[in-house]
Amino acid sequence: MKRIDSSGVSPLLGMILGLAIIVGAIGIVQQVFVPAWVKNDEWDHYVTIKNDVSSIPKLVALTASSKNPNVVTLNLGVKRGDYPFLMTPPDSGSSVVSRDLKLVVKYNITLPNGTVEQRVLPITTAALIVKPEYYYLPETEFVYEHGYVFSRSGKNNVTLVDQIGFSNRTFTFYIFKTNFNSISVNDVYSIPLNPISTGGKVSVVNATLRFETLNPDYWVDELRKLNLNPVKIGNNISVNLTNAVMSISIVGEEGDGVRITYRPYLYVSEIRTFIGDTEIIEVVVLDQFGNPVPNVPVNGSTTIGSLDSTTKTTDANGVARFIFEATEEGTGKVTFESGGNTASADVTVTEPAGGPPRWSKNNNDTLVISPDFKWTGIHGASEIWLRNAAQIGDREGMGHHMTGSDFDINFVLYNSSVFFYFEMDFKKGSGSDRVSLWKANDTGTYTLLYQERLNSTEADKVFTDEGINVIDPDNYVSLNTEERNNLLQVKWFLQNATLSDPVSLQVQSIEEGWKVEIQIK
């Protein structure tokens, strides 16, 4: 019987067994560890892209407020580790869809010169839908719309960044514009944010908003928290705002078809001045969204007097300042053109320079007063009206003086024997407008006759053409009998003044950057 040599069998079996162990180990790694590693890679990307999309509201708001460009950076590439002897899914990318959403705003707006205009603004904004390609993580989309970010997986929506546009008295719509409909990228993708139209705040009345959304239930809940009573119609939300401050900012990629139209506005509808005097006329240029338009030409012309220039360029606040000089007596008009539209104001030039204007009992003049204003020859009058108080200095876009304004004026009434001193503090909408009245004694000291709040409804009229009679006791909150009689002293003082001993009105101070019209009748 032939014997078998087994000396080479054991090493071979050892090699086979070792190889089997290695293959088995690789199989275990492939089946158990590789999916965990890939899931970890995908999770890292999930966190990164979630943060990228969540940063969009902040970047959009920053672009609108600073008027400086920014960039949205999206890390769309899903990178997976490459391990020797192991099979891993290849790197993948993400898709980004730009979805148009419709928005319509209807509102009444108070223009800089005090007139009210009804406007309807149909606008299209973009929602961004970012969808990464994952092998192991659940299918997820990240959505940005209207300054709000959420994620959705299946039927579940999870808020990542709450809306930043609405509060009880203000609303800001950030209109986002893109140049693409859909892209698929496996690398970093950047979307430029340029300030296309920004910087305005306007006071609106009876505003109605209707906007399309990809998550209407969220908006219903949010707006109900603000007591705004939203109405959901399909994917559209409607809400009414009785009185609010509105801002519409448009940011995004340029060349997206946004057509900006603009026109000039004046803060006065009439200018009354005297021969030899000069007036600063501010022209603010605003686009259809109520935002100031910088760096555009404004052309000026006048049919009476002269302007210091026929063309000025608007500053960062959309304002161009002209200086009008009254060189002749008469009436005329100043006209300003920008963007193919015009604004004008009537001009009346009276009284040669060389002395304070003299009051005429027959014409009831209304004059614009300044810190050095003095009016002489007042006799037989009984009312003092203030109206059309407005800022003439820096302002944040149209209507700034209509929201949160603080206007102070102090003036004296006197003749040869009597001296009254008024201190007035107006804060529109505050309900805390206050007037103090002092009277000089023979010894040169002052007696406080009253210090009382004005009725807020009446006091706010100082900012409008309606105006307020500041020596009417009925315009005050609660004057007692003594205070009422003290105020009536001023009325009697005016009524009893004669042509031989008339009253003069001298402005002591006026809030810097403000002007106001005064009428004595």
Image: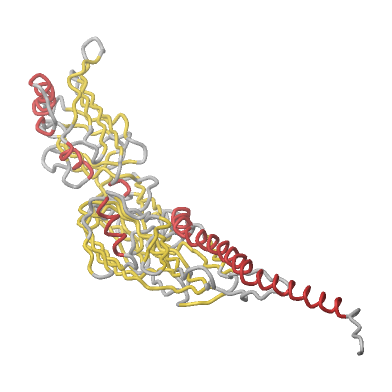
Of residues 494 and 479, which is closer to you in this image?
479
- Relative to residue 51, is residue 263 drawn left or right? left
Q: Quadrant of the N terminus?
A: bottom right
Q: Position of residue 270 (x, y in %)?
A: 24, 51
Image vertical order of residue 493 relative to residue 353, above or below: above
Residue farthest along the bottom direction in this orientation:
1
- Measuring from the top left, give residue 102's x and y in whole percent: 32, 70
Q: Quadrant of the C terminus?
A: top left
From the viewer's perspective, is residue 419 above or below residue 275?
Answer: above
Q: Nearer the viewer, residue 282 or 354?
A: 282
Tell me the residue at 89%/80% (across/down).
6
Tell me the residue at 29%/62% (across/down): 217
Q: Position of residue 490 (x, y in %)?
A: 13, 25
Residue sitting at x 91%, y 86%: 3
Tell whether 217 sits left or right of 458.
right
Q: Residue furthest top?
A: 443
The colour scheme of the drawn protein is secondary structure
Q: Residue at x 33, y 35 (%)?
A: 511
Residue 313 appearing in the image:
no
Q: In this figure, what is the number of numbered marks? A: 0
Q: Position of residue 390 (x, y in %)?
A: 29, 45
Q: Nearer the viewer, residue 183 or 418?
A: 183
Relative to 130, is 290 above or below?
above
Q: Nearer the viewer, residue 354 or 478?
A: 478
Give the quadrant of residue 124: bottom left
Q: Quadrant of residue 84?
A: bottom right
- Whether residue 479 appears in this view of the structure is yes
